[in-house]
Image: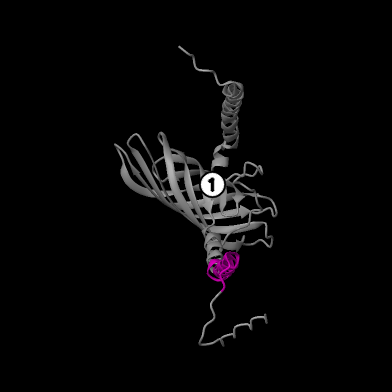
Amino acid sequence: MERPTPNCHQDRRAPGAVATALFFSLLAVVGLPTRAISETAKAPATIEESFGAGRARGQSWARYQTYVPQSREYFLDIGSSWEERSMYWVGGAMGFHLGRCAFSASQTCQQFLDGIVGISGADGLTMGLALASLRWQFVNFPKVAAPAVSVFAGLENIHDGSRNKETLAYGMGLGFVASVHERMDLKFEVRVGYGQGEAIWSQAFVSLGLKLDKWVDYFATKLHELGVGTVEATGGVIKKTIETTGEALGISEKPNPDTTEPKSSPTPPAP
């Protein structure tokens, strides 16, 4: 029986095909870990980077700026409180700028009238506060931070197993505020107060100061820009894009017969 003659041409090409396959397989094996390492290197490594930090530029969401008093200030408080036991404290404050401090010609001392509300509680003890406060903020322009001293008075509501009453409360506070962003201040404050006929209480907390007035002005400006500048610019870009696309495709705009006179066809050249 006659055996089939082997194809020598195919045998000579087989080693080249095997080598090519091995080469691309090696590239795939090496390339996949390299790509994974590259993607891992680009991933945010901190909370700040996850919330807007520019990793490549080394920027952070917090950019300390000169502290400047606002016409109105809004603070959200979270921290701890103590009366008969340790409690949480959640509250807020709204401040109204009154100008420089009374009986002082210096612009360093700025005066505020604050309204404060909040609640403390733990293990069956609840204490609510509604206070009015006079605050003196010492602005050391152009520094990013400013200390503050305040006095306050108002109502205190206490409720636990043996008490359920409202009483007069008063005391003083000491704080330190820094401008960490063009839209936010950060403040640390300690208060010590006394409920008439009850006990001394204290608070230590951190406040986020939201510059809502500047937010409103900022977004109003942005909306104005979007309604006037950006829309007109976008329309111009779209129009130019359509014209350029038509020219690239060899499509010309057809003349309007009502407004444009028809052009006569060119005279063919003489034979």
Chain part drawn in magenta = 225-252
Task: Work out whether 42 lies above or below 104.
Answer: above
Instruction: Report whether 251 appears left or right of 153.
Output: right
Task: Work out whether 104 lies above or below 152.
Answer: below
Is 246 covered by the magenta stretch?
yes
Residue 226 picture location, percent across and down: 54, 66
- Amino acid type at circle 1 is Gly
In which quarter of the view is residue 218 placed?
bottom right
Residue, x 62% and y 24% (percent of image)?
A: 16
Task: Work out whether 199 lies above or below 111.
Answer: above
Residue 254 picture location, percent across and down: 53, 77
Quick one: 172 or 258, which is closer to the camera? 258
In which quarter of the view is residue 81 placed?
top left
Residue, x 45% and y 44% (percent of image)?
A: 194
Is 112 covered by the magenta stretch?
no
Q: Main secondary structure of the magenta part?
A: helix
Q: How is the image coloured?
A: one colour
Circle 1 is placed at which residue position? 173
Placement of the N terminus among the 4 image quadrants: top left
